Image (spheres, helix red, strand yellow):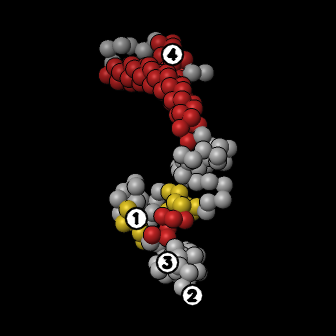
Amino acid sequence: MKITEKVAYIRGLAEGLELDPSQKEVKVLNAIIDLLDEMAETLTDVHSDLQDVAAQLDEVDEDLGSLEEEVYGGECTCGCEHDDADEEDDDEPFGEDDCYYEVTCPNCNETICLSEDVICVGQMDCPNCGVPLEFDIDDCEEDDSCGCGCGCDHHHDDEE
């Protein structure tokens, strides 16, 4: 039985008692029943509105899922543009052989994906809240621009 039906049932019971409407107690009882009736109607309206909002929210969620799929292209859960399906595109920030890290900002608790190059720089501002993030990782490759493996910036030409 719905709440409006329950209030109607109570109203019928009260009317079935055939009480004198001029008595103070009966006036109070009728006022309570009227209040219950108004509350039941309001609850019914709120429930109907809530169902409408839930349906609209489901539609927005579906649209957002489609948009995320189109923009991000994959199932990466960290919010970056990493796409396991199309790694051949040079516009993608991460290739198949690229190493990337998921980093959680200690300030806003948002997870971001960073390439090894960004991590090796040692610091950056969080793209979500702007707080500076610092990284200390031992796996970063030393600068080997000279090709000798020494880590220097000096270009060794044939020095014989």
Q: Classify 10 Å Cα crowding around label 3: few (below 14), some (14-19), many (20 and above).
A: few
Q: Residue at x 62, y 60 (%)?
A: 98
Q: Residue furthest bottom?
A: 160
Q: Identify which amino acid the numbered label 3 is placed on.
A: His
Q: Name the residue that disc number 1 marks.
A: 124
Of labels 2 and 4, earlier in sequence is 4
Q: Which of marks 1 and 4 is in front?
A: 1
Question: Which residue is drawn at the image coordinates 35% and 59% (left, top)?
Answer: 130
Q: Which of marks 2 and 4 is in front?
A: 2
| Precedes in sequence: disc 3 or disc 1 | 1
**Which residue does the image show at 38% across and 23% down from the upper left?**
35
Quadrant that contains the N terminus: top right
Residue 74 appears in view: yes
Q: Position of residue 32 (x, y in %)?
A: 39, 24
Which label is found at residue 155? 3
Say which mark, if any, is on residue 8: 4
